[in-house]
């Protein structure tokens, strides 16, 4: 079952492209003193760029950084105007309304409702490429008064990820097929048109889900065990290790899966669900793991033995 915000966002069909503020507009905006983040990704970014002290409430799925998060929590999957409007500490110069609310999923049309109450609400949906992810970091810097640190973070991430991609050796004649799993029971996956899928494509992975994608899937098709078996991927990426305890061992126990090349040759990569589903500062951690795994598979002689 898709119960978490992570999976809800993964299957969301809408993608909003957000215009960045001009430097002059950003500098002219008063830095918010009460921010509410209803996006785990935005929460990570806000703390990474130095805006943590301005954040007074986050969603229930925000769990990073591991220290310093506010205790006030809001259900981002079922938010109410009342739960957000009265969240801030009232002072002589500030009401209970937040200055800024960041969302990544417009549950209950909360954006329109908060805007109607005079609360600035910005939606940052899952991007489809690296540029979109970095643009969101820059935008948060502009919105919160931390332009310099946000720009530096985005630049550093871009440089690190580019180096990872460049480190993968060319491999003509080696078709590295891969299956990326979001849920072990429904076999939801992602294609090369999605954000993480685009990263895998740049690393030379041929995604088995691409052939099953339709316009209705928006890049997140539901596969079947039979299809995965027939595609016989050389690599399997598990983005369901925390939620569902997926592992090489559990995958091998599925009917027929012990004979899948990725399983037989131990090229099943367990990813941290949270890191794999967010596009903030820890994206470099995900990219490093994907890159290391791809290079390992390319050097795994068993994968390339001719039967």
Image (cartoon, grey):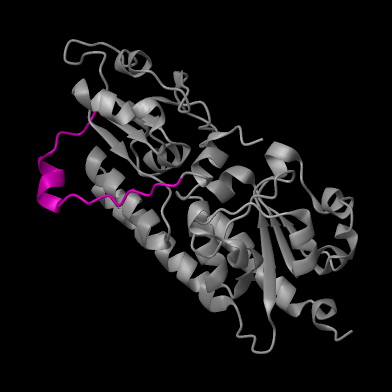
Identify which residue is drawn at 63% across, 54% down. Answer: 189
Q: Residue at x 34, y 35 (%)?
A: 102
How many numbered marks have been drawn onto this rendered protein structure? Answer: 0
- Apparent side of residue 41 relative to residue 24 in the rendered image (left or right): right
Residue 99 visible to an observer of this rendering: no
Check residue 17 for magenta coloring: yes
Q: Quadrant of the C terminus?
A: bottom right
Q: Main secondary structure of the magenta part?
A: loop
Q: With respect to residue 72, does 240 lie above or below?
A: below
Residue at image coords 53%, 35%: 5
- Relative image position of residue 167 (x, y in whole percent): 56, 77
Furthest residue in direction bottom, as rendered: 172
Instruction: Locate residue 117: give its quadrant.
Output: top left
Quarter of the image where the N terminus is located: top right
Q: Nearer the viewer, residue 174 or 155?
A: 174
> In terms of depth relative to the viewer, which is nearer, 186 or 138?
186
Q: Compared to 283, does 114 lie above or below?
A: above
Indicate left or right for 16 with 284 as reference: left
Residue visible at 42% across and 22% down? 79
Q: Is residue 68 left or right of residue 302?
A: left
**Magenta-tinted stretch:** 13-32
In the image, residue 269 above or below residue 31: below
**Can residue 94 be seen by looking at this rendering?**
yes
User: Residue 285, position in %: x, y?
Assistant: 56, 55
Which picture quadrant has residue 53?
Answer: top left
User: Residue 248: percent from the left, percent from the top?
Assistant: 82, 54
Asked whether residue 248 is drawn in magenta, I would say: no
Q: Nearer the viewer, residue 111 or 135?
A: 111
Q: At which x and y percent is residue 234?
A: 75, 70
Give whichever of 279, 285 is nearer the camera.
279
């Amino acid at each position: 079952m898709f119960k978490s915000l992570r999976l809800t966002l993964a299957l969301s069909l809408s993608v909003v492209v957000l215009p960045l503020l001009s430097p002059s507009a950003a500098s002219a905006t008063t830095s918010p003193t009460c921010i509410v983040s209803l996006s785990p990704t935005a929460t990570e970014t806000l703390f990474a760029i130095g805006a943590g002290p301005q954040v007074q409430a986050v969603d229930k799925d925000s769990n990073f950084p591991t220290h310093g998060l506010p205790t006030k929590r809001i259900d981002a999957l079922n938010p109410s105007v009342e739960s957000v409007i009265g969240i801030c500490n009232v002072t002589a110069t500030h009401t209970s309304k937040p200055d800024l609310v960041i969302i990544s999923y417009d549950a209950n049309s909360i954006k329109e409702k908060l805007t109607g109450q005079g609360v600035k609400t910005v939606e940052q949906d899952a991007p489809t490429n690296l540029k979109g992810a970095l643009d969101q970091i820059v935008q948060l810097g502009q919105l919160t008064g931390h332009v310099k640190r946000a720009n530096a973070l985005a630049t550093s991430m871009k440089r690190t990820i580019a180096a990872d991609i460049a480190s993968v050796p060319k491999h003509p004649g080696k078709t590295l097929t891969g299956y990326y799993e979001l849920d072990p029971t429904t076999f939801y996956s992602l294609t090369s048109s999605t954000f993480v899928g685009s990263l895998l494509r740049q690393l030379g992975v041929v995604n088995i889900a691409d052939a099953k994608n339709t316009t209705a899937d928006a890049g997140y098709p539901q596969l079947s065990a039979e299809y995965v078996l027939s595609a016989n991927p050389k690599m399997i990426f598990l983005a369901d290790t925390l939620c569902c305890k997926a592992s090489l061992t559990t995958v091998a126990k599925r009917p027929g899966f012990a004979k899948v090349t990725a399983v037989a040759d131990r090229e099943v990569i367990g990813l941290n669900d949270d890191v794999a589903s967010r596009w903030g500062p820890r994206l470099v951690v995900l990219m490093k793991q994907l890159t290391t795994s791809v290079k390992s598979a390319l050097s795994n002689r068993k994968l390339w033995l001719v039967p």
